[in-house]
């Protein structure tokens, strides 16, 4: 999953609390399966970095999809 936080000029933490809460929700309720993960972006200006990291992690080759064994036909 990819969580994108929105920075609020009125918050000193740059929206970190909201991004952390949403990332926790994704880990608990959204992503499933082996190798599933959440990448976070701190606002839309951080999107390119986060998406690049996410795609590289997905293509790294360490995570494999689980396929059920083939049935004899």
Image (spheres, rainbow, N blue to C red):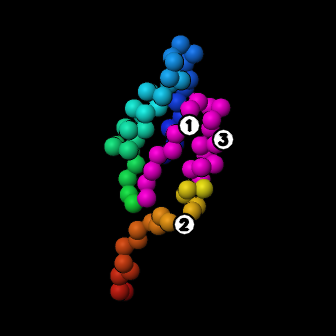
Q: Is residue 63 above or below residue 16?
A: below
Residue at 37% of width from left, 53% of height from top?
32
Badge 2: residue crowd in 10 Å (few <14, some 14–19, many ≥20): few
**Secondary structure beneath label 3:** helix
Residue at 43% of width from left, 59% of height from top?
35
Q: Dot 2 corresponds to which residue?
A: 61
Residue at 63% of width from left, 48% of height from top?
52
Q: CA distance from mark 1 to mark 2?
A: 23 Å
Indicate yes or no whether the magenta region holds residue 36.
Answer: yes
Residue at 54% of width from left, 34% of height from top?
4
Q: Position of residue 14 (x, y in %)?
A: 53, 23
**Secondary structure beneath label 2:** loop
Q: Is residue 28 left or right of residue 49?
A: left
Badge 3: residue crowd in 10 Å (few <14, some 14–19, many ≥20): few
**Secondary structure beneath label 1:** strand
Q: CA distance from mark 3 to mark 2?
A: 21 Å
Q: Which mark is residue 48?
A: 3
Question: Magenta span covers which residues?
Answer: 35-55
Indicate yes or no whether the magenta region holds residue 41.
Answer: yes
Q: Quadrant of residue 46?
A: top right
Screen quadrant of the C terminus: bottom left
Please name whichever residue, 31 or 38, is drawn nearer the observer in this view of the structure. 38
Q: Position of residue 43 (x, y in %)?
A: 58, 30
Q: Position of residue 61 (x, y in %)?
A: 54, 66
Q: Dot 1 corresponds to which residue?
A: 41
């Amino acid at each position: 999953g990819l969580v994108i936080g929105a920075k609020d000029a009125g918050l000193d933490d740059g929206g970190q609390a909201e991004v952390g809460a949403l990332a926790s929700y994704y880990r608990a309720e959204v992503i499933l399966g082996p190798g599933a993960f959440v990448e976070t972006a701190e606002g839309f200006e951080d999107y390119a970095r986060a998406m690049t990291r996410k795609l590289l992690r997905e293509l790294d080759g360490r995570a494999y999809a689980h396929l059920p064994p083939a049935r004899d036909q």
